Every structure is written in structure tokens, then in C-alpha cells.
Image: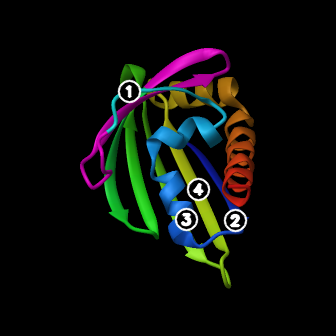
Amino acid sequence: MTRVHCAIEIGAPPARVWEVVMDPRRLADWVTIHRHLGPVPERLRRGATFEQTLNLRGAPLHVAWTVVDVDPPHRALWEGQGPAHSRASIVYELRPDGENRTIFDYTNEFKPPGGALGAVAGRVLVGGLSQREAQRSLQRLKMLIENE
């Protein structure tokens, strides 16, 4: 399993950050590998689902996401099913950091198909790409929110 964790301080209260990160329609504004979004429910609550296409090293990756747990505006857990039984989970954790500041913690765990051999192949294919793209995405999120 590949695990990526990044955190960033954003100059906005947690409720504002939550509003952006929990709106899948805004993924294109800040997630660097996002390419397409299927139909999205009006409100994301536990059990809500949607499909997303990501671009990983030039190849499209289709993921069906389910909101597993949500505690606004503090924490959300998403689980995804990808091609060939690959799986992912994403955790958003937000905590206030003084007045009008938020620490946004992002954790992504990805399990490629194919057991141990698939895990080795996944590390070779992805390398440090996941960490770099997560950091770039969080920087874009920070700029987006602080400049709106």
C-alpha cells in the first residue's frame, strides 16, 4: 500500500475550507491530477457516491468514490474503487489554527491490484509522484481559498 500525507496552513476558517474541499465540483480548481467528474449528489453525506477520472502518468484512472464518514467541518473519509480491484482511501482533517486559519491534513492510501507484486509495481510506476502532486494540489487549494 502506498501512503501519502501532506498538511498545509490555509488563511481561512475551517468552515470555508470545508465548503471548498467537500464540493466535488471544485476538484478541477485545485486537484492537479483531476480530469473529469461524473454526476454528483446535491449534498455529500455518509453513503454519497460519485465517479472521478484522474490522470496518472498520462493514463486515465477511473475511481468510484463513496463518502464513508463525515463530521463537518472537521473530518471526511472517502473510499474509492479503481480498475482491477485497486482501492484508495482519502482522509481530510481540518483544525483551526488561531483566528481565521486552518490546518488541512490530507492522507491518501492506495492499494494497487495484484497483491505484493502489484504493490512493488505501483511504487515503481508512481515513485514520488503521488507526494509531489498532493503537495502541488494543497498549494493550489491554499491559493484558491486565500485569493477568493
Indicate the amino acid at tag 4. Tyr
Question: Which span of residues is magenta-colored?
Answer: 41-62
Instruction: Characterize the local packing of mark 4: few (<14), some (14-19) or many (20 or more) Cα atoms within 10 angstroms.
Output: some
Residue at 39% of width from left, 38% of height from top? 80
Disc on the earlier residue, 1 or 2: 2
Horizontal and vertical percent for residue 30?
Answer: 64, 42
Tag nearer the camera, 4 or 2: 2
Disc on the earlier residue, 3 or 1: 3
Disc on the earlier residue, 4 or 3: 3
Indicate the amino acid at tag 3. Arg
Q: Where 117 sits versus 138, above or below?
A: above
Task: Identify the element where label 1 is drawn.
Answer: loop
User: Is residue 30 shown to the viewer in this render?
Assistant: yes
- Spatial CA span between label 3 and label 2: 10 Å
Disc on the earlier residue, 4 or 2: 2
The answer to whether mark 4 and mark 3 are in CB contact below 8 A is no
Q: Which residue is mark 3?
A: 16
